[in-house]
Image (cartoon, rainbow, N blue to C red):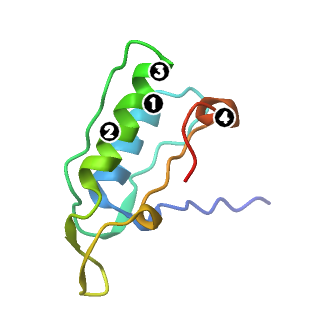
Amino acid sequence: MTTVIVLNRNYRSPQNIVSLASQLLEDLPERQQKKLKSEYEEGDKVTVAQCANESAEVEFVVKTIKEMLGKKIKRRDGTDNPLTYKDFVILSRRKSEGKNLPSR
């Protein structure tokens, strides 16, 4: 006998990120439908950018990070510190998608 355990709680991302991920994945044919929940409240607004090519995509990411550097944010531990490079991570499905991004 097989027991199915549905993992539907996210402990890292705010609810708006979890909801967006669910929307993007809901039409996948082999995906088990489930309602994902976050341990955290809504986060900042999500930006979806359509870029003309990989170079434009890299330019957009670098520009966005540079604009955010130094801005103070309310952190989960209650502190109010400015953003540094250590606060950013860029995720991609495949390693090759990040090859054009500069490393710090």
Q: In this view, does 101 lie above or below 34?
A: above
On the image, the x and y values in percent for residue 22 come to 40, 43
Q: Residue furthest bottom?
A: 78
Q: What residue type is labelled 2?
A: Lys
Q: Which of marks 3 and 2 is nearer the N terminus?
A: 3
Left or right of residue 18: residue 54: right
On the image, the x and y values in percent for residue 16 come to: 27, 53
Q: Residue 55 carries which label?
A: 3
Between tags 4 and 3, which lies in front?
Answer: 3
Residue bearing the label numbered 4: 94
Asked if marks 3 and 2 touch (Cβ < 8 Å), the reply is no
Circle 3/circle 1 CB separation < 8 Å: yes
Q: Nearer the viewer, residue 91 or 71?
A: 71
Residue 95 place in picture, x, y as percent: 69, 37
Quadrant (top left, top right, bottom left, bottom right) of the C terminus: bottom right
Looking at the image, tell me whether mark 2 or mark 4 is earlier in sequence order. 2
Q: Which amino acid does label 1 sit on?
A: Val
Taking the spot 31% from the left edge, 28% from the top edge, the residue there is: 49
Residue labelled with disc 1: 58
Q: In which quarter of the image is the N terminus?
A: bottom right
Can residue 5 be seen here? The reply is: yes
Residues tagged 1 and 2 counted as in contact (Cβ below 8 A) = no
Q: Which amino acid does label 3 sit on?
A: Ser
Helix, strand or loop status at disc 1: helix
